[in-house]
Amino acid sequence: MKRLTRLRLSARITRLRTVAALSGGLALLLVAVWSLTLERVVYEAREAEEAEVTQVGRLSLAYEQQVRQLLAGPTAALRLLTADPASWRDLLAQTRPVPPAFAAAGLPVSLADATGTPVGAAPALPPDWAQGLIALHQQHPQAAALIQQPIMDAQGRWVTTLSRGLWDQGRLQGVAYTPVDPGALLAFFALGGLAPQDTVTLFDPSGIVLARRSGAGQDRFGLDVGQSALAKAAAQGLRRTLFTTSPVDGIERAYSLRPLPEHGLTVAVGLGRAQAMAPVRDRAQRYLVLASLLTVLGVVAVVGLGAAWLRHQRSVARLRRSERHYRALTQLSADWFWETDAQHRFTHQTAAPRHAGAQVPVHFGLTRWEQPGVLGSAEDWTRHREDLDRHRAFFDFEVRRIDAAGRLRVALISGMPVFDAEQRFLGYRGIGHEITAQHEAREALRESEEGYRLVFENTRDGLMIGRSFGQVDQVNPAACQLLGRSEAELLQLGLSVLDGPDSPLRQVLEEARRTGHAQATFTVRRPDGLQAHLQASFAHYLDSGDRRRSSVLLHDLTERHQAQRSQAELAEQLRQSQKMEALGSIAGGIAHDFNNVIAAIMGNARLATSALAGSGPAARYLDEIARAGLRARELVRRILTFTRQQPAVFERQPLGPVVREAVDLLRATLPSGVRITLQGDEEPFEVMADANQIHQVVMNLGTNAWQAMSGRGGRIDIRLAAPPGSGWVVLSVQDDGAGMDAGTQARMFEPFFTTKREGEGTGLGLAVVQNIVRAHFGEIAVDSRPGQGTRMEVRLPVACEAENTGFAPLPAREVPVAETQPVPLPSGAGGGRHIVYVDDYEAMVVMVSAVLQAQGFRVAGFHRSLEALAYVRRQGSAVDLLITDYNMPDLSGLDLARELRALRPQLPIIVASGHVTDTLREGALSAGVSCLFDKPAGIDALCRRVHEQLAQDDPLTGF
């Protein structure tokens, strides 16, 4: 309200100032008019005065000359008559009548002495007339002739005298005077053409009007105006012009005074100012009337102009208020106005409001598409120019520009064509609207939506969004993958896809409706038969339109569940492994003892066979004993393989016998309702393989095939083949079980992956098969369909190719192990060399000693390692080779080897064991053992190793 009051007061002050300014202007104008008018009047009055002065001066000069001429004759006569003092001295002395000469002159001249006494006849004048003349001449001794103040005689006529002083030696002796008609002095004045108010006056020095005539014909004589300004000026005897009022008739005149000092007169010609200034007054009146009229017109004009100006000011004020309102409205918007000419070049643009942001200025004289920094495709600008050239209105045309700061500016431009009265195109006029903020917000929203879409589509967690709980209208790919269903299926099923017999879905939905969020764990059976363990987080909220929305975030716990399950299984496997390790240790010890027993049996059977040297029943019995020993030896080897105590040994061998042996074991293991067939096992398909691992592959694949039959009977077909030109030996195992879908096939080789119930499988069988096949540089393929069984193919490289595909001989640093089936040596090959044999099993000492002695060696057998050590120290270099058992009391075979190596660095040492492990290999290498011998290899193999070691120059070349 105060602001409005101040605005109104300011408007009033503005109007008052405006009125004051107009009034001041009018006053100045009137002052100027009146100043000019008065100046003109004064100027013309001055001009009239000067003209009057000039005229009165000329008249006074003329009248002066007339008076002089009029008085010149009588004065000359008086001067002539009185020129000779002698002529009048006597007259004065004798008091005689005037001489006849005076009479002859025609002048009624009279004389008077110094006392003023007339001499002779005198004119009819007052008695004291002559005395006045004497006094007058005494006042004016230099005057040639003086005229006395007129008087009226008895007949009523005005008379005066013209007198001349009679001077003798500087003394006035008398006067000569003659009567003069004062009217005669003024007679010629009528010829001057005086105006009615003009006058001609003769003054004497005392201010007496000797004669006065006006232009109206009035004569006056003998007036005493000595106190008037005119008389005082005349008494001074100066030529001058003055403006004064006549003391006779009170009329203001311009007087020109012309003194006649020789006569004691002053001629004053006066021109009436009223008459002289009448034209000036008339013009002054006209000027004043004109000034007044101009004043009135000025006042009226100013009033009119003031009123019009006030109306204009009110209009301007209304226009300014409207403009302020318009500016206020434009300030509330982000628009600016622009104009272009007929060539579409900018000619005008208003500034954008401050809140609209930094407006990009235009360059006048350039078109919109020529502006610096403008963006846009050529096609867009071409279409826009076509619209402009066709004079079409356009709306919300988007213009993008880069400003000086490098920021993108976006505006919407709308324009209308402008035409003149003749419909000639003048250009465009329109508005622009800054939408940079909206554009940036739109871009940010788009980027946010893209980011949301990327997160929505690429997150590993499933996301389901719906209008309310139960209904779903958006699902991401992760949800489809986790639940094993398509997007269309999930949109149709909604959250019911999480429902099931033991599902907490209803309780969780109720909690989410009540609290806004809830969380639970679900186990969902997928259509492919797999189970998905999911942690579902439910949220209930209102969107920007206050619509109820719900979302479910699905986090996959399957791996965690499997990891937990695997952890439990691994713990169980660890326990089993520990049991197996313990069992392996026991089996290793038992195998060592078994191998000793078996070696003794087989060795003694060998000796007995050699001793009989025949083919009778005893020989056959001994062969059966040998074959039983071989079977016992193989049984021990299988026990060691089962307990993982036997290292893999890649050997070139036919694949058929290995597979046949595994199939025989498989038939004995599986139920009798399972029929197993084997084909191709008689073919010579040689491969580089570890027989035990191939045995395990056949057993695992056969077991899996039987488990696919779900406890019912069925058929398992095992076949060996070598497709021509393939370079592979193919081992195929085919069953008629339930088969597998694509999802199960994709994960069948993953460790611990299984489709069986808990306790029915570990999920390691096929993983072990895959690792064994890869270790043999082979391949494994699967062909299976649900309900049609499964065919597994193991492809191994044939032996000739396998040797060139990465298989290498044992490293040189390993201790060589005796071959399993060496060629027998002839007797007597020992050459009497001395061998020390040590074994804690006396039967082995007896048997080996006997065999070696039969080969021609000298043998010293010991069943205690310390005794053997002492013996070698005593014999020194007489001992050629030492054979010792590994597992012995006191000193083990390796400890004994170390002691002897320190004593005899070049002594060949063979360590024999019924159970060769990697630990034993490493220990033998560090102890300096020349050769490791596997007792199950047999006595003949041992003899061959002995001969090989004795045949070498350097017994340590095996290292």
Image (spheres, rainbow, N blue to C red):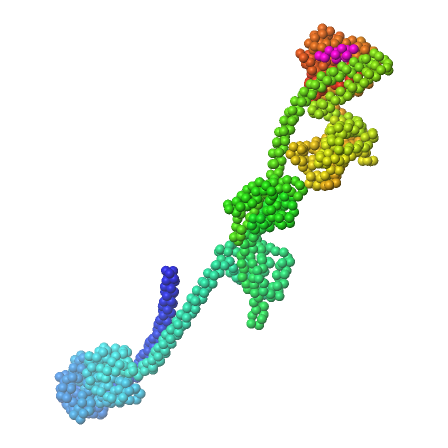
Dominant secondary structure of the residues highlighted in magenta in the image: helix
Residue under the point 83% across and 14% down? 618
Q: Is 843 inside the magenta-drawn segment? A: yes
Would residue 642 be found to the left or right of residue 340 on screen?
right
Q: Give the residue furthest to the top.
A: 874
Q: Is residue 163 above or below residue 894?
A: below
Which quarter of the rendering shows the C terminus?
A: top right
Residue 727, image quadrant: top right
Q: Is 592 inside the magenta-drawn segment? A: no
Would residue 271 be found to the left or right of residue 317 on screen?
left
Q: Position of residue 836 (x, y in %)?
A: 74, 10
Taking the image as drawn, is residue 405 in sight? no
Please give the range of residues in magenta.
836-850
Would residue 931 be found to the left or right of residue 408 on screen?
right
Q: Nearer the viewer, residue 819 or 471?
A: 471
Q: Is residue 123 above or below residue 809?
A: below
